[in-house]
Amino acid sequence: MNRINSLNLLMLLFLMVLVVIVSNLIISVIKSYALFISKSEFIINKVNELTPDMPPM
């Protein structure tokens, strides 16, 4: 009985560590994606400033 409980506890701990790692990975991916989006928005704004006669897309 005690062995089964300790095994379940170990599995739970492993699952928690896995969840933390995966969430950190997802957060870093989202941050880099948001940085990429803001950079491309900045480039689009610069292009729009340079060509004001063109109608907006």
Image (cartoon, rainbow, N blue to C red):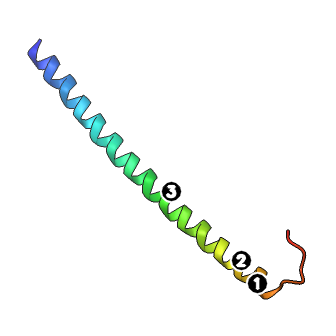
| Kind of element beneath mark 2 | helix
Q: Position of residue 8 (x, y in %)?
A: 21, 23
Q: Residue at x 61, y 66 (%)?
A: 37
For this orientation, the residue located farthest to the left is 2
Query: Is 49 in front, or is 19?
Result: 49
Question: Label for residue 49?
Answer: 1
Q: Residue at x 22, y 34 (%)?
A: 13
Query: Is 46 in front, or is 17?
Result: 46
Distance, label 1 to label 2, CA atoms, is 6 Å
Q: Is residue 39 left or right of residue 32?
A: right
Task: Give the mark count.
Answer: 3
| Kind of element beneath mark 1 | helix
Q: Residue at x 72, y 76 (%)?
A: 44
Residue depth check, mark 1 versus mark 3: number of the one nearer the observer: 1
Q: Residue at x 25, y 29 (%)?
A: 12
Distance, label 3 to label 2, CA atoms, is 22 Å
Of the image marks 1 and 3, the number of the one nearer the N terminus: 3
Q: Is residue 45 left or right of residue 54?
A: left
**Rendered position, 48 above or below 11:** below
Q: Which residue bears the numbered disc 3? A: 30
Kindly check if marks 1 and 2 are in contact, taking CB atoms under 8 A apart as contact: yes
Q: Which residue bears the numbered disc 2? A: 45
Q: Residues within 10 Å of mark 3 (few under 14, many from 20)?
A: few
Quadrant location, the N terminus: top left
